[in-house]
Structure formats: structure tokens, C-alpha cells
């Protein structure tokens, strides 16, 4: 039973929620801008901040629990012809058989995740913090979650900084501001991580690449025929961003756009 709880990510998600609301509670209990505004009856900013934190938690569970784009064995056979028609028939773009799933015809840009035990379409990476893969179906929601989380963290930094109180001695200062200082350090570290993560993902989205493709392109069969600076899926920054963030249509991520010595599709 305990083993299943750990495998399900229950512990990770519980820690995330508890840590989030402990930090929020500390910001409200200390003499911060939030506390002073609440005491003065100015409830707009405290309410908006609370809703922003709640939204970040909801997005966290959305990204963590949703299907990232698992390739199902019963749909692989039916989709093979579709991909073969869409993708030019050459050695670097043909469908591959997954060595772990065995029965699956693995489409381009898909990868088997040994943690999730499934192949994932347009696999980006397996995120231990959400205990789920980031792939075709939840990648844009992952970016939205990071953006909301960053806004909440930066606001929390400003709030925690506003709550420090002067004291006569360092010992007294730490006793008064200890919890707030710890909150500031934790929020600062998470802010730096989220900034770096969001920046890297936005760059990869702008060139229509994934973390897996960017880090392991020398081991990926359909990228070995291209130079280090060539990306067969790149349509230009504007088109790449439009394809990624536009939710009104389905994007065929496996579509190849040849560059350089290759002919255009």
C-alpha cells in the first residue's frame, strides 16, 4: 500500500500543496503588506493573491494528473497509415518500433518513459516535481502553470520583503523575522528555478524542439541526418509559437520541414 502511494506521486503532490499553503499562511500572519492591507479593510490585493495561489495549485494538479499524450497500443496500428502519408518516406522519418512497449509503432518525436511505462507523443521530459511526463497534450498547460507559478512567487518575494521588522540585536532580529527569512529564501530559490525553466522552454518552443531532442539529438534516429544547427520541424519563431499556443486546431507535430541540403516538403 505504501509503495503504491509513493509510486502514484501522492507524497510529492502533498508536499507541494502543504509547502504552498504554509508559505501563504506565513505571509498573512507576519506584518507584511498583505497583513496591513487586510487589517485596513483593503481586501483586493489579499484576495487576488490568494486566488493566484489557488490557481497555481489547480494548474499543478491539472498538469500532474492529465494524460501527457500516451501512445496507446490499440491506436498505433490505425494511426500508422496516417503518419506514413504525412511524413516523407525516408530512413530518418519512418515509424519505429518501441523496444519497451513491443507492440507499439512509435511515431516520430515520441519516446518511451520508463517511469510512466508508456510512449509519449512529442515527449519533452519526465518532470519529477509533477510526477508526470510533459508531452503533446499537457506541454502548453505546463507552460501556463509555470507562468502563473512565477507570478505568484515574484509577488510572494515582494510581500515577504515588506514584512521584515528592525530589531536592536541580531538575535532578536532572527527571532522576529526567522520564519519570514526562511520563506524569502525558499521562494527565492523556487523563483530562480522557475525563471530558468520557463526561459529554456520558451526558447525550445520558439524553435519547435523538445528538451529530449535538444539534449539527445545525437542519439535520435530521425535527427542524425541533420547538422547541429538544423531542425526539420522549425517553421520560424512566429509559426512555432502560434502552433504551440493556439488551442483552436490540432497540430501535426511530426510534420517535417526540410532545411539546408534537404528538399522542402
Image (cartoon, rainbow, N blue to C red):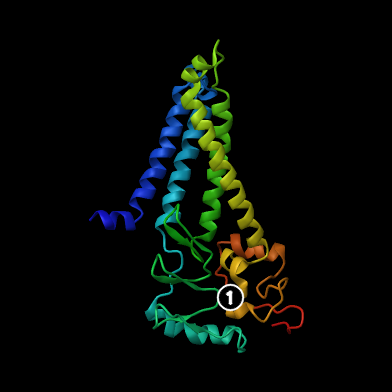
- Identified at 43% across, 85% down, the residue is 77
- Identified at 62% across, 86% down, the residue is 88
- Identified at 73% across, 71% down, the residue is 229
- Residue 32 appears at what percent x and percent y? 52, 22
Quadrant the N terminus occupies: bottom left
- Identified at 62% across, 72% down, the residue is 217
- Residue at image mark 1: 219
In this rendering, the answer to whether 166 lies above or below 123 is above
Q: Residue furthest top?
A: 168
In this rendering, the answer to whether 210 lies above or below 78 is above
Q: Is residue 161 left or right of residue 53?
A: right
| Image quadrant where residue 200 sits | bottom right
Q: Residue furthest left?
A: 1
Q: Is residue 70 left or right of residue 90?
A: left
In this rendering, the answer to whether 194 lies above or below 101 is above
Q: Residue furthest right?
A: 260
Which sits in the foreground, 128 or 152? 128
Quadrant the C terminus occupies: bottom right
- Residue 152 appears at what percent x and percent y? 53, 39
Local SS, label 1: helix
- Residue 194 appears at what percent x and percent y? 57, 47
Q: Residues within 10 Å of mark 1 (few under 14, many from 20)?
A: few
- Residue 187 appears at what percent x and percent y? 53, 37
The image shows a total of numbered marks equal to: 1
Amino acid at each position: 500500500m505504501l509503495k503504491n502511494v509513493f509510486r502514484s506521486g501522492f507524497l510529492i503532490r502533498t508536499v507541494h500543496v502543504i509547502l504552498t499553503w504554509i508559505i501563504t499562511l506565513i505571509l498573512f500572519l507576519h506584518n507584511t503588506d498583505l497583513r496591513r492591507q487586510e487589517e485596513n479593510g483593503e481586501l483586493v490585493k489579499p484576495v487576488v493573491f490568494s486566488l493566484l495561489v489557488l490557481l497555481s495549485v489547480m494548474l499543478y494538479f491539472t498538469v500532474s494528473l492529465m494524460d501527457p499524450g500516451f501512445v496507446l497500443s490499440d491506436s498505433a496500428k490505425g494511426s500508422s497509415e496516417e503518419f506514413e502519408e504525412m511524413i516523407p518516406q525516408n530512413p530518418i522519418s519512418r515509424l519505429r518500433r518501441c523496444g519497451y512497449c513491443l507492440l507499439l509503432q512509435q511515431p516520430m518525436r515520441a519516446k518511451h518513459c520508463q517511469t510512466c511505462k508508456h510512449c509519449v507523443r512529442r515527449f519533452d521530459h519526465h518532470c519529477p516535481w509533477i510526477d508526470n511526463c510533459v508531452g503533446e497534450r499537457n506541454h502548453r498547460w505546463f507552460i501556463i502553470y509555470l507562468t502563473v507559478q512565477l507570478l505568484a512567487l515574484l509577488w510572494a518575494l515582494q510581500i515577504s520583503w515588506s514584512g521584515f521588522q528592525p530589531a536592536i540585536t541580531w538575535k532578536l532580529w532572527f527571532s522576529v523575522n526567522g520564519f519570514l527569512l526562511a520563506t524569502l529564501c525558499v521562494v527565492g530559490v523556487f523563483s530562480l528555478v522557475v525563471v530558468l525553466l520557463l526561459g529554456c522552454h520558451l526558447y525550445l518552443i520558439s524553435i519547435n524542439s523538445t528538451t529530449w531532442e535538444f539534449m539527445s539529438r545525437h542519439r535520435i534516429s530521425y535527427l542524425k541526418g541533420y547538422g547541429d544547427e538544423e531542425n526539420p520541424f522549425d517553421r520560424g519563431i512566429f509559426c512555432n509559437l502560434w502552433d504551440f499556443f493556439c488551442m483552436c486546431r490540432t497540430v501535426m507535430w511530426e510534420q517535417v520541414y526540410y532545411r539546408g541540403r534537404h528538399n522542402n516538403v
